[in-house]
Image (spheres, grey):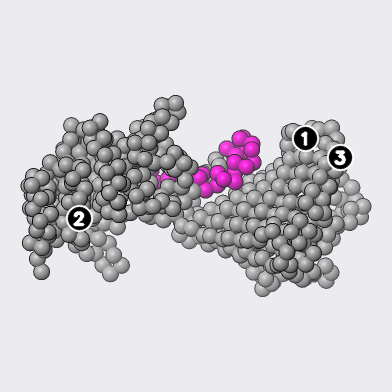
Amino acid sequence: MSQLTTNYLTPTGREEAWRFTPLKKLSGIHDLEVPVSDRISLSAKSDLPKGVTLSTSSSSDHPPAYVASDIVTNRVRKEVKNVTVLAIENNLELAEPIFLKRKCGPTPEVSRSIIQVGINSRATVILENNGVGKLGEEIEILLSAGSSLNFISLQEWDLSSVYVAQHHAIIGKDAQFNSYVVSIGGSTIRMSPTVEYTGTGASAEMYGVYFATDEQHLEHRIHVNHSVPNTKSRVNYKGALAGKGAHTVWIGDVYINKGAEGTDTYELNRNLLLTDGARADSVPNLEIETGEIVGAGHASTTGRFDDEQLFYLQSRGIPAEMARKLVIRGFFAEIINKLKNEDIEERLMARIELELSRVGE
Amino acid sequence: MSVLEIKNLQVSVITEAGNKEILRGVDLTVKSGETHAIMGPNGSGKSTLAYSIAGHPKYLITGGSVTLDGNDVLEMSVDERAKAGLFLAMQYPVEVPGVSVSNFLRTAVTAIRGEAPKVRTWVGEVKEAMASLNIDTAFSERNVNEGFSGGEKKRHEILQMELLRPKIAILDETDSGLDVDALRIVSEGVNRVKANSDLGVMLITHYTRILRYIKPDFVHVFANGKIVEEGGPELADKLEEQGYAAYITA
């Protein structure tokens, strides 16, 4: 793995990491020549519970906790003067989720945030990305020993929005990180949910759902770095596509380094093409440097909702539009139901069905 | 009392190499309570008849008419035909990824009946129908036809027929690929629906085996895209002895 930390250059599209991304649609977030604002775009949706704070402070007080190879992440680090810090103190058990909302401006901007989960604390953080925006972002998620975090990021952007983000979790000893990524809105989304482990017994479950329609580009680049003994990862992303020019990219990179004996990992990506003219790229990648592991596997499938399936459902009285909805609901239910929030689940399915009904318009 | 009336039906199959004529003028009337066996050699057009009545998009109607109780079936969309009371049990039921059997059945029944079935009675209704077809209740959570064995697919077709309560059902080679036990279970299912609902049945088959379980009132011999001989149950006995050779012209 190459580590590009200094002298980074604007990508041209020929780089392996950028070959799928439509650079022209990024509004210059990746382009060092295009100026970006560093306004604070993240805030709490309601009062925070006791023991939780959201503040901003100078980025010089918060040097990056890991080496980033992504060009946009490095740009964010360079441009952002003030970072947003969500801190959850030690030994806190939060029953209710913490909601963070996003408010972007009309011009390209960057944002850097840090989420700190204290020792043995348990919390759910829900990040709601919506509205109009052109945002490059890094979120650093630090899970202290024995902690547990459900981190849900919902991309319900306006259909004109651009979002390039790296959400990097550093998982401490015996900590549990559960990531849920839902991407529906936005013109172009390129998200890199990445994790690394700093202590044994650490575990990550990473789930994702994406639905792309006409001319939408939704890219998810998962990276799991097993470098200490006895850690676990599970990745399961499901995507559906409908309409001309709908494009999704899923990259699943899992590395099991020399010192990572006892690693247990499995990653899965399933794509469902609902109409012609859509394209799903899926690239699972597993690199193993030690044989002393519990298990390592990956699978990727891309299926098609075809005329025969449509005929079968219709022949049972189900109208064509409802048949597509049925298929899509069933397909996504496995992951959407894991959010365990009925309001959000219904809202997401309604948005998916609305976009489905507009395909080809 | 329902009547499915097929008059001088002519159908071509749409292929990349052009359209090919399959049905060459089929006349057939099926009424409630009647069972019609459509028998014929492979390639005679029996399945084309079934699929064109159901409205499969790969068939082109070039002439004739199909009506159900006087309503023009050929003008209806596929789902409208099902709502009007037609049911096709398919020879090769299609796998539908992501849709569980329970969700599928509930959605179909809601569409056909025009309202969602009441949760309390619905669960019992499905359980009972599944039990009588020897279908494990764990089936409900599986995706439609995905990974089903041949026999499971056919029983699942009859389960749908039982729950959707059609007026006229077309069973396309429902007996194919079934062992004796599965054939008996499936046949009993058809007979039970007939007994309970005055269902009219068009039973398409190559073999006489299923007719030991489902007794036809009429037997039609199908060859080269049309009906070439008609009679009562005794005609099936004759076919059992003599085969289709007499009907196949070079």
The stretch in magenta equals: A319-348
Front residue of this view, candidates B67 and B211: B211
Residue hosting label 1: A94
Q: Is residue B137 above or below residue A20?
A: above
Residue B60 lies in quadrant: bottom left
- For residue B245, say whether it is visible: yes
- Amino acid tagged 3: Asn
Residue A330 shown in magenta: yes
- Amino acid tagged 2: His
Residue hosting label 3: A90
Residue hosting label 2: B206
Residue B30 lies in quadrant: top left
Callout 2 environment at 10 Å: few (<14), some (14 to 19), or many (20+)? many
Where residue A239 appears, as percent x and y from the top left, is: 56, 54
Where residue A84 appears, as percent x and y from the top left, is: 83, 47
Q: Is residue A15 above or below residue A165?
A: below
As measured in the structure, the alpha-carbon distance from the residue carrying label 1 to the one carrying label 2 is 66 Å
Q: Residue furthest bottom?
A: A14
Where residue A254 appears, as percent x and y from the top left, is: 69, 62
Residue contact at pointers 2 and 3, CB within 8 angstroms = no
Residue A223 shown in magenta: no
Which chain does the numbered disc 1 sit on? A
